[in-house]
Amino acid sequence: MDQWTALGLVAGFLTTVGFVPQIVKGIRSRSMRDVSLIMPIFLGLGMLLWLLYGIWLESLPIILWNAVAFALNMVIIALKLLYGRNGGG
């Protein structure tokens, strides 16, 4: 693995792990009232396009971290749909 691939893997990890605190907070509080639905929808579409681009380039960091980030983003969307309106179940 070259230094640029390693850099891409570290950068992707750091930007992707940023989703985890929001997911944990949403699960614990059972509230996603203050989270916009539009933002993760647009972000998810962008991630999907980055994933396709990474597949085309055969770039491990782009493929790996956009696939993980897309999955985490879908969890945020699901939590928003589940807990977003009234703050919880």
Image (cartoon, rainbow, N blue to C red):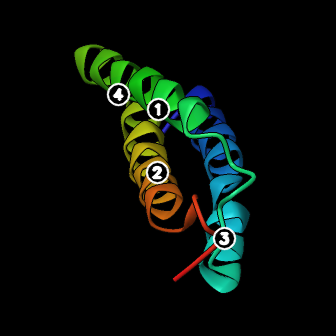
Tell whether label 2 touches label 3 (CB within 8 Å): no
For disc 4, the neighbor class at 10 Å (few under 14, some 14 to 19, many from 20) is some
Q: Secondary structure at mark 3?
A: loop
Mark 3 lies on residue = 31
- The label on residue 80 is none
Q: Which label was assigned to residue 77?
A: 2
Q: Amino acid at mark 2?
A: Ile
Crowdedness near tag 1: few (<14), some (14–19) or many (≥20) residues, C-alpha within 10 Å: some
Q: Earlier in the sequence, mark 3 or mark 1?
A: 3
Residue at x 42% of width, y 43% of height = 70
Position of 37 with respect to 77 (left or right) is: right
- The answer to whether mark 2 and mark 1 are in CB contact below 8 A is yes
Q: CA distance from mark 4 to mark 1?
A: 11 Å
Q: What's the residue at 33%, 15% (across, down)? A: 53
Percent position (x, y) of residue 19? 64, 54
Is 54 drawn above or below residue 9 in the view shown? above
Q: Earlier in the sequence, mark 4 or mark 2?
A: 4
- Callout 2: few (<14), some (14-19), or many (20+) C-alpha neighbours within 10 Å? many
**Numbered mark located on residue 41 in the image:** 1
Q: Looking at the image, which is closer to me, 22 or 51?
A: 22
The amino acid beneath tag 4 is: Leu
Q: Position of residue 33 (x, y in %)?
A: 69, 58
Q: Nearer the viewer, mark 3 or mark 2?
A: 3
- Mark 3 neighbour density, 10 Å: few (under 14) some (14–19) many (20 or more): many
Are the residues flagged by discs 3 and 1 in contact, CB closer than 8 Å? no
Residue at the (45%, 57%) spot, across then down: 81
User: Relative to 74, is 53 above or below?
Assistant: above
Q: Disc 3 residue type? A: Ser
Q: Amino acid at mark 1?
A: Ile
Spatial CA span between label 4 and label 2: 14 Å
Q: Which quadrant of the view contains residue 39?
A: top right
Disc on res. 48: 4
